[in-house]
Image (tube, grey):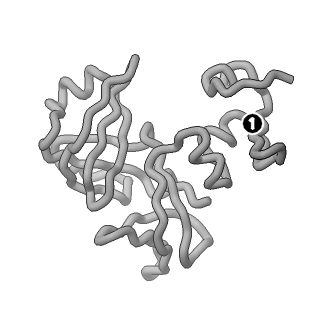
Amino acid sequence: MHVTHNFDEAMIMADKVCVLNNGEIIENGSPDDIFKRTSSEFVAEFVDYKNIFKGNIIEAGDDKVFKLNNIEIFLVTDKTGRQTISISPEDIILTNEKIISSARNCFCGKVIDISFKQYICEVTVDIGAPLVAYITKKSCENLGIEVGKDIWTVFKAVEVHVF
């Protein structure tokens, strides 16, 4: 057993991760289960998930749609009603032009923040709600991303995680 708050260390060393709150096990599973597919909003906030939104999931024909402000996010789930979702920043593609693909979610927004991390750029785009995407520094440069620029965000319905 190894106790740590260093998430990189946990991802590298652990076969199984346990998250505790006030001495109670909130969730346990593989590092991927905890850091990419948690079933707990507490754990999502603890491990610093980005793009956590509360809203309503409705049925729209054969589709499920998450209503967030004035946008509709397609997702794959059996849940409806008031729910919390997250979208991993690494699952979001940024592009200068709208693209045609199998990704169901494509929104144009305005870059409102860029944060340069060690190996990546964290780009926040206002699509009607702030959406954080991770891209390489080279991609940020190639796309000419700067605060105030309009940019397209693209992600698949299967990448929307429901808690």
Look at 82% across and 46% down and name the residue there.
25
Residue in the image at 77% along x and 42% along y: 20
Q: Residues within 10 Å of mark 1 (few under 14, many from 20)?
A: some
Q: Is 10 displayed left or right of 101 in the figure?
A: right
- Foreground residue, 42 or 34? 42
Q: Secondary structure at mark 1?
A: loop
Q: Quadrant of the C terminus?
A: bottom right
* Percent x, y of residue 16: 79, 32
Residue plotted at (42% across, 65% down): 74
Provide residue 148's location: percent of width, then percent of height: 13, 43
The quarter of the picture where the N terminus appears is top right
Image-quadrant location for residue 7 = top right
Q: Whole-percent x and y of residue 11? A: 66, 26
Q: Is residue 13 left or right of residue 78?
A: right
102, 153: nearer the viewer: 153
Q: Residue furthest front?
A: 22
Q: Position of residue 85 (x, y in %)?
A: 52, 59
Q: Does 145 sit above or below residue 61?
A: above
Report the amino acid beneath label 1: Ser
The quarter of the picture where residue 128 lies is bottom left
Task: Report the front residue among 126 and 97.
Answer: 126
Residue 143, placed above or below residue 2: below
Point out the residue furthest to the right here. Answer: 1
Indicate left or right for 136 with 13 as reference: left
Q: Quadrant of residue 30?
A: top right
Taking the spot 48% from the left edge, 80% from the top edge, the residue there is: 59
In the picture of the structure, the residue carrying the numbered disc 1 is 30
Counting every numbered tag in the picture gives 1
